[in-house]
Image (cartoon, rainbow, N blue to C red):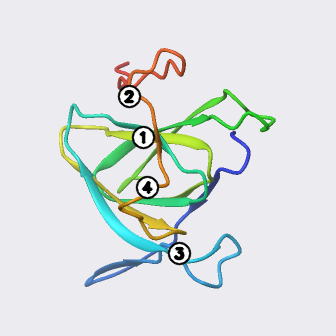
């Protein structure tokens, strides 16, 4: 497990009308601050990776489909520097994934349908000076396997 990454199973409250799922509450022990909330959708066969932030914490919840999230610890002072991690999440496994600054991340759909990820950030996006560091999705230094296993 990469230091500072947090995964929490989300409580799904179903009834005969559908269900409710709380993604993040201000009284959660993991809540830091509110920046903004946005939805990003990724199509099958596409990998949205790699990027990280210097100040911002991202909180992912996959609300449609399933995604394979890749994480890479790019923080030189971290005890888990250089470690990789995979998280499968979505409608079949409802999780909240918190990604600290300095941890590169990206995702790809698992299956044949697009996947939608809600991101709750601690910072507002600055269009003129984005808090982003980027690397190619297939960066050989990271060497992450984005394929889906067929057994």
Left or right of 116, for residue 136: right
Quarter location, residue 136: top left
Residue 70 in picture, x, y percent from top left: 48, 36
Quarter location, residue 18: bottom left
Q: Are marks 2 and 1 in contact (CB under 8 Å)?
A: yes
Q: Which residue is mark 4?
A: 130
For disc 2, the neighbor class at 10 Å (few under 14, some 14 to 19, many from 20) is some
Going from N to C along the chain, the mark reached first, 1 or 3, is 3
Q: Determine which of the numbered discs, if any, sits on residue 106 in the image.
A: 1
Secondary element at image label 2: loop
Q: Determine which of the numbered discs, if any, sits on residue 137 in the image.
A: 2
Q: Is residue 55 above or below residue 86?
A: below
Secondary element at image label 4: loop
Going from N to C along the chain, the mark reached first, 4 or 3, is 3
Could you tell me how far apart the alpha carbons at marks 4 and 1 are, in whole angstroms? 17 Å
Left or right of 124, for residue 98: right
């Amino acid at each position: 497990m990469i230091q500072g990454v947090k995964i929490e199973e989300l409580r799904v409250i179903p009834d005969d009308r559908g269900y409710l799922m709380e993604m993040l509450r201000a009284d959660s022990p993991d809540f830091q601050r509110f920046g903004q909330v946005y939805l990003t959708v990724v199509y099958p066969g596409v990998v949205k990776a790699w990027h990280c932030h210097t100040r911002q914490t991202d909180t992912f919840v996959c609300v449609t489909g399933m995604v394979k999230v890749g994480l890479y610890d790019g923080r030189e002072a971290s005890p888990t520097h250089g470690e990789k991690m995979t998280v499968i999440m979505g409608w079949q496994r409802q999780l909240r994934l918190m990604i600290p600054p300095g941890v590169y991340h990206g995702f790809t759909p698992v299956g044949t349908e697009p996947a939608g990820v809600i991101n709750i950030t601690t910072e507002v996006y600055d269009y003129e000076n984005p808090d982003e560091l980027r690397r190619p999705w297939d960066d050989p230094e990271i060497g992450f396997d984005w394929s889906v296993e067929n057994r």
